Image (cartoon, rainbow, N blue to C red):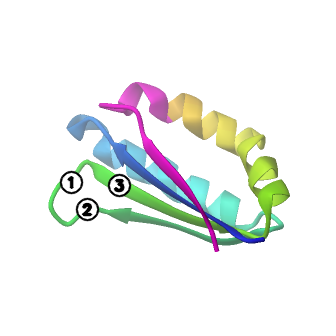
């Protein structure tokens, strides 16, 4: 069963440019993973510091492999101080 993950993050306004660079790198590395079908990041049209991640994986194992990857852990450690609140994470069957 395919899995879709949607994540909404709010970043400190002074960190928006830095976050965008890190997120682009994260998307590139993640999309090259086996089992990652889609990995997109969008910036809010209304709030410059709001971002939405849309990810689609072949199955739960592919998602777990992504979540335990070195680049994922590095990304999370890098952006955590930039967050203004806890990310909103939702998972769906696709």
Above or below 84: residue 72: below
Residue neighbourhood size for the residue with mark 3, other residues' Cα within 10 Å, grouped as few (<14), some (14–19), many (≥20):
many
Instruction: Indicate the quadrant where residue 28 lies.
Output: bottom right
Question: Toward which corner of the image does residue 5 lie, by quadrant?
Answer: bottom right
Q: Please tell me whether mark 1 sits on a helix, a strand or a loop.
A: loop
The reply to whether callout 1 and callout 2 are in contact (CB within 8 Å) is yes
Q: Nearer the viewer, mark 1 or mark 2?
A: 2
Label 3, label 1: how far apart the Cα atoms are: 8 Å
Which is more toward the observer, 14 or 61? 61
Residue 41 position in % (x across, y down): 45, 63
User: Residue farthest to the left?
Assistant: 46
Please name the residue that numbered disc 3 is placed on. 51
Name the residue rendered at 38%, 43% in the picture: 18
**Mark 2 to mark 3: distance in Å?**
6 Å
* Mark 2 residue element: loop
> Residue 44's mark?
2
């Amino acid at each position: 069963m395919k899995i879709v993950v949607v994540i909404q993050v709010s970043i400190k306004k002074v960190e928006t440019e830095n976050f965008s660079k890190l997120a682009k790198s994260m998307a590139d590395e993640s999309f090259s993973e086996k089992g990652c079908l889609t990995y997109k990041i969008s910036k809010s049209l209304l709030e410059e510091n709001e971002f939405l991640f849309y990810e689609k994986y072949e199955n739960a194992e592919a998602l777990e492999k992504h979540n335990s990857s070195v680049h994922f852990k590095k990304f999370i450690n890098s952006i955590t101080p930039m967050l203004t609140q806890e990310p909103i994470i939702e998972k769906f069957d696709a």
